Image (tube, rainbow, N blue to C red):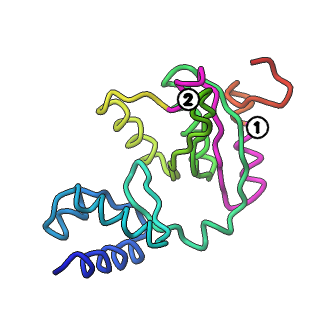
Amino acid sequence: MNAAQRRQAIMRCLNREPDAITASALAAMFSVSRQVIVQDIAILRAGGADILATPAGYIVPRASFLKRPRRVICCKHEREEQMVEELMTIVRLGGCAVDVTVEHPVYGEFKAMLMVSTERDVRRFIARLRENGAGPLSAITGGLHLHMIEADSEEALDKIVAALTKAGILQMQGEEQ
């Protein structure tokens, strides 16, 4: 199989799989290195393929997700257990933390895809942070960050907002920083 054929096969795999697939798993499927897969994904994305890189691996967004109600929320927390509470609250109430955005004073906006929609996703995300000795993006902004969240209904989003407000995680307009 040449590189072009492998890239077509990668796209077929990503299009049929509903869950994210890691570069390592794709590498094993195609008997190449993880770095080759990362390069293949970069080439596919440069060619216009809609592939998201998430902490759980690569995924092609589904039309059903794109039609769900979405909302941007502003959160602040400084401890890992608060981050876990935030993400678990979102997923337990039927939401998905699509991404996280922070505003760096020099570089501007940083956005990372999360696509965290289950308790398992949250546990995996936290484990990867710990394994890699990485902190959350919000560490560079004193804990302040934005999330795009989505759910099946506006009512579910309202419940998420209410729960995060009650937990003291959600930052409301006009609050002191």
Q: Position of residue 94 (x, y in %)?
A: 62, 53
Residue beneath the point at 71% across and 56% down? 70
Residue indicated by mark 2: 138
Q: How many marks?
A: 2
Residue 33: image location, x then y, percent = 17, 58
Residue closest to the eye, 89 or 144: 144
Q: Residue furthest front?
A: 106
The residue drawn where x is 56% and y is 44% is 111
Whole-angstrom CA distance, mark 1 to mark 2, is: 21 Å
Identify the secondary structure beneath mark 1. Answer: helix
Q: Quadrant of the C terminus?
A: top right
Mark 2 residue type: Ser
Query: At 32% from the left edge and 80% from the top edge, which residue is drawn?
Result: 8
- Answer with left or right where residue 19 lies relative to residue 61: left
Q: Which mark is residue 162?
A: 1
**Quarter the N terminus occupies:** bottom left
Q: Is residue 156 left or right of residue 118?
A: right
Residue 157 magenta:
yes
* Residue at x 65% of width, y 38% of height: 146
In this rendering, is residue 36 above or below 5?
A: above
Left or right of residue 165, residue 61 in this image:
left
* Residue 73 rendering spot, x and y as whole percentages: 71, 41
Horizontal and vertical percent for residue 95? 62, 51
- Label 2 element class: helix
Work out whether mark 1 precedes mark 2 in sequence or the reverse, and give the earlier one: 2
Query: Would you say residue 134 sits in the magenta stretch?
Result: no
| Range shown magenta | 137-162
Toward the viewer: 53 or 91? 53
Label 2: few (<14), some (14–19) or many (≥20) C-alpha neighbours in 10 Å: many
What's the amino acid at mark 1? Ala
